[in-house]
Amino acid sequence: MKKLNKFLPAAMLVMGFGLSAQAVPIKLLSANIGNSDIICTGYGWKLCLDSVEKRVTESIRAIDADVVLLQEVVPAERCAARNETKRGFVCYDFEQRPPEKKEQARRILGPDYTIVITKGAYEAVAVKKGVGHIAGCLDGALCVVSGLPILSSCDQGFSITPVDIEIRGKRVRLINGHPDSIKADCRAKEVAAAFSAVVPGSTLMAGDWNLDPYRSNDQSVKVWKQNLESRGFHYLSGIAERNPPYHTIFLPVVNIPLKSLDHVVSDFAQGHCAVLGVSPSTKRLDGHSDLDHRGILCNLEF
């Protein structure tokens, strides 16, 4: 596993980031794969069961996306600290696994991707080999990056992770977003930080943003809306597909309102996204149950 301590400065990346006259087709998947099963509480509701991981793996590999952004994977460091003794859980028999089987993101995506995981958090970004490259990470490698700083008063398990890629000749900044789900003030600061990492005219932001800009208006939603408008971003998911947008989270709790928390926005890319298992003619990543979020699959042009 290779560790990266910093991203290339934004000012260095602006040069050469302009779009060419020829559009580049890209298939992109963004998915929170946390497991809502009650027995996953000990894993913080992350993807804790082997059986669910297997189904999610089969679905994601069948999609064969060029770019994948995942939230709520279980990183190897968590398994190493857990000492799981029960069969059927993703951290069972961890020490006996070969290195290439220790990271859940690698097990799910397989050997055909270059992957970066966020240090101390539960997120991963991947680009398919032969299609693109991740800056600072050798093709096919699994690297560790530091997300943007999270205030000490906020939950350090959440993250905002900028990743610079070159895909079919286009340089793009991806921002994998998973801000605080509980504290709106923390979430607002983390959303603001995400927009501060934008490379103008070349950024795509995706993930579980833990805010519903269509039905809510808390502090984080206000920051989100203000930045989308002032920075020239547009939706590729949500209302870009359907108005009102499909819900993306389905908690197994009575009387919890359905929401759209997962979003894909960009200041340059064009195309459309579908909510897997909700949009017509689409299938859920988990096959039939377990995940509380629905993945978003996009056909885009860079």
Image: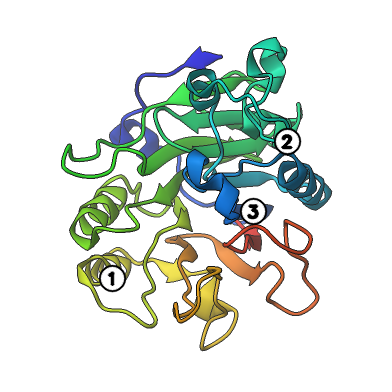
For disc 2, the marked residue is 88
For residue 135, which numbered disc appears in the image?
none
For the residues labelled 3 and 1, say whether their Cβ atoms are less than 8 Å apart.
no
For disc 3, the marked residue is 29
Foreground tag (1 vs 2): 2
- How packed mark 1 is, by other alpha carbons closer than 10 Å (few <14, some 14-19, many 20 or more), is many
For residue 221, which numbered disc appears in the image?
1
Residue type marked 2: Gly
For the residues labelled 1 and 2, say whether their Cβ atoms are less than 8 Å apart.
no
Dividing the picture into quarters, in which one does residue 107 lie?
A: top right
Q: Can you say which quadrant of the picture contains the C terminus?
A: bottom right
Q: Can you say which quadrant of the picture contains the N terminus?
A: top right
Instruction: Indicate left or right for 239 with 290 as reference.
Output: left
Picture residue at 77% right of the left edge, 70% below the top = 282
- How packed mark 2 is, by other alpha carbons closer than 10 Å (few <14, some 14-19, many 20 or more), is few
Q: Tell me where residue 94 appears, x and y as whole percent.
A: 65, 19
Q: Tell me where residue 31 appears, x and y as whole percent.
A: 59, 54
Check the image and report above or below for 208 versus 280: above
Picture residue at 39% right of the left edge, 81% below the top = 214
Tell me the element at label 1. helix
Q: Which is nearer the N-term, disc 1 or disc 2?
A: 2
Tell me the element at label 3. strand
Residue type marked 1: Val
The CA distance from mark 3 to mark 1 is 23 Å
Q: Nearer the viewer, residue 273 or 221?
A: 221
Foreground tag (2 vs 3): 2
For the residues labelled 2 and 3, say whether their Cβ atoms are less than 8 Å apart.
no
Q: Which is nearer the N-term, disc 2 or disc 3?
A: 3
The CA distance from mark 2 to mark 3 is 27 Å
Q: Tell me where residue 193 appears, x and y as whole percent.
A: 25, 48
Picture residue at 66% right of the left edge, 32% below the top = 90
Q: From where the camera sits, is residue 58 visible?
A: yes
